Amino acid sequence: MAETVTPPDSPRTTGHLLASLDPLLREWLPRQRWFAGKGRPVTGFTPVAATELLPPDGKLGLYHLLLRVHQPSVLGAEPHPGDCYQLLIGVREALPPRLAPALIGHVQDGPFAGRTVYEALYDPRPAEVLLEALRTQARIGGLRFARDPRQEIREGLVARLMTAEQSNSSIVYGDTFILKLLRRVEPGVNPDLEIPLALAREGCPRVPAPTAWLHAEIDTESYVLAVLQPFVSGASDGWELALRELAKGEDFVAEARELGRATAEVHTALARALPTTTLGPVQLRSLADGMTERLAAAVQAVPGLRPYESGLRAAYRALAELAAGGRTWTAQRIHGDLHLGQCLRSPSGRWSLIDFEGEPARPPAERRLPQPPVRDIAGMLRSFDYAAHSAGSPAPHWARACRAAYCRGYAEVSGRDPRTDPVLLRAYETDKAVYEVVYEARHRPDWLPVPLSAIRRLAA
């Protein structure tokens, strides 16, 4: 095992560096797709950790930062200490034109006065520093780079940043690996590493096995920061593939069926690999109450939901009534945020599931709770609906065919068709649609008609 140990972080790396970056980051952070606190000003930063990866004495300096970002609380919300974000900051005398989109700003004072700071992931050299640290299992300050010793990481792989909008950042190395760098991080176990490792132990081929990972040990807490996995070269993103088929007037039935089979294989493996539990009346009542509370909050945030509130509540009442009657369901670890964009089809036609982080807006402890598999299924059914309404003209018949095929494929592997649990499926699909309405109203108002069309159907 190779190990690199650096001296403790210098004051320049922490206090002086952060003071000089403060005014630049207040402007830059809210513009990033992965920044969760949009709509509220940034009022300050608290350093969690700052690590020098490359000294700034040469052409390029590189710093790894964990920053707690302070913002005013949302009206009525509990006081919050601020989200912690992971940043990789590059320092240069001047940016070459190819790095113009990465610009954060020009430092006015402090140790780097007159120099330029930028988002380092756009730059192949800093990205290659990360891969080399993973390959050699380096220890740099509080950062711990670890890997599966059974998997080889070759030197000299060229890095490129994936520019698709997402809640994290991804770097592809050659056509061999993809590194997912988590942006908003919290201490504790992260399902995006935990679940793929568990599935790898089970030999489930539907999820790429982690090759390496980065975590930080800070005081008594551990943060998972990045996961390196094999890159499926030539793979098609499920969302993009569905939209292409729609544009050509082709159905997606065969692919939806295969996706159902893939989902069932992952659920079956997870039930073997990690503990399961039974949800009884008390847990199910709590589940229905939580859905009802989220609906009430959503109606306050998006008044356009109010005409449908009574019909939507009926879905949750039906679930509570089943719970009161003694109905139980098995709960297990699931994907937690399953949709077409979390699925990849290889050139051979095989589907894989990726991104097991769960819904980033929910606390990590909640994302790791066992849940009914139908929650994942509801997410995928909503995704087919989204695709059908993203075409030039809505294609509800296309979505219905995909939904049916997906459920059939799931039943072929699991032995149980999700549609045989209509009350639980409707409750979860309703809860997801309500979440979508709030999200679109805040972030993409032009998309609001898509979940509202489902709301009308589900409330009927």
Image: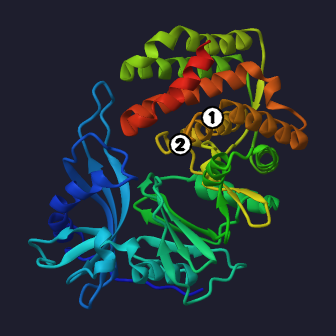
Helix, strand or loop at label 2? It is loop
Image position of 11 with respect to 280: above or below: below
The correct choice, above or below, for 297 with respect to 311 in the image is: below
Specify the amino acid type for callout 1. Answer: Asp
User: Sequence-wise, which precedes: disc 2 or disc 1?
Assistant: 2
**Is 369 drawn above or below residue 143 in the view shown?**
above
Residue 102 vertical position relative to residue 336 in the rendered view, above or below = below
Look at label 2 and name its amino acid. Glu
Q: Between residue 161 and residue 270, name the one nearer to us.
A: 161
> How much space separates mark 2 and mark 1, taking CA atoms?
19 Å
Quadrant position of the C terminus in the picture: top right
| Residue 416 location (% of width, % of height) | 87, 33
Q: Residue 414 carries which label?
A: none
Residue wearing tag 1:
385
Residue 197, image x and y in percent?
Answer: 69, 61
Instruction: Say if residue 8 shows up in the picture.
Output: no
Asked if the residue at tag 1 contacts the one at tag 2, i.e. Cβ–Cβ closer than 8 Å, the answer is no
Which residue is painted at 31% across and 43% down in the image? 38
Q: Is residue 85 visible?
A: yes
Q: Is residue 54 left or right of residue 391?
A: left
In this rendering, would 450 be left or right of 123?
A: right
Q: What residue is pinned by disc 2? A: 359
